Image (cartoon, grey):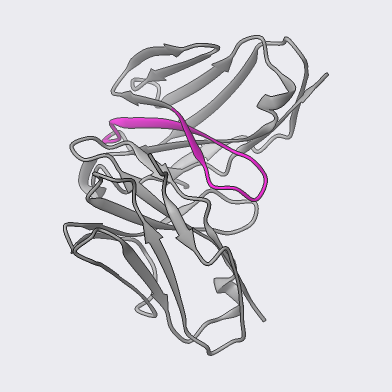
Amino acid sequence: DAGVTQSPTHLIKTRGQQVTLRCSPISGHKSVSWYQQVLGQGPQFIFQYYEKEERGRGNFPDRFSARQFPNYSSELNVNALLLGDSALYLCASIRTGYNEQFFGPGTRLTVL
Amino acid sequence: QKEVEQDPGPLSVPEGAIVSLNCTYSNSAFQYFMWYRQYSRKGPELLMYTYSSGNKEDGRFTAQVDKSSKYISLFIRDSQPSDSATYLCAMSGGSTGANNLFFGTGTRLTVIP
């Protein structure tokens, strides 16, 4: 079974631009979460989606948005990028009926 | 006060040593406790998952949860150089929801051959 996949692996953007990150969960998992991990820190919760509906939102500005598709894949969008948005963005696939979260390799975003 | 406190280390031990990693937390509603291992520039890998208080063992790894003290631990027996990584504790539960994980900052471990 394939694990969680994320694309792209790396991304370089400039301030003010917009970015879209993509995630495919483990087959059979219907819920995904997104996290931001700044260098030297633990991941911080951004969003959770289950069956295409938002089920949780962390303390992030409205520049951050997400959605989930019928095949349970998900996109995270960040508008008006700031230097402080530079981080590793992680997608977690949540085992249906449990709370175990399995992370993908992440997308490393650099904002110049 | 942070929700989860974790000593960032770094921690260096000789091969074969027993490693003890710890986290404390402030939210008494947390019920789900996890330990992740993260290699440099990679995503976190789930090592241990525990619900409520008690011990759980999986091979060389033992996770302990003491909810009365708001303290969780991960023990690694017979540590190997391949265990060198950053270890993150994570927890969830209560009004913030079961799937909103709160992480510690991570402890960087080096096992010296």
Q: At 25% across and 58% down in the image, what residue appears? A: A72
Residue A107: horizontal and vertical position, in percent? 54, 62
Residue B15: horizontal and vertical position, in percent? 77, 14
Q: Is residue A97 magenta?
A: no
Image quadrant in which you'd find residue A57: bottom left
Q: At 37% across and 45% down in the image, what residue appears? A: B101
Q: At 58% across and 24% down in the image, what residue appears? A: B21
For the record, the magenta segment spans B29-47
Q: Nearer the viewer, residue B15 or A84?
A: B15
Left/right of residue B18 with respect to residue A95 in the rendered view: right
Image quadrant in which you'd find residue A101: top left
Q: Nearer the viewer, residue B5 or A45?
A: A45
Pick the quarter of the image with the C terminus of chain B: top right
Q: At 59% across and 70% down in the image, what residue appears? A: A86
A16 up-or-down from B14: above or below = below
Kindly give the residue lying farthest to the right in the view shown. B113
Q: Nearer the viewer, residue B30 or B99?
A: B99
A12 up-or-down from B98: above or below = below
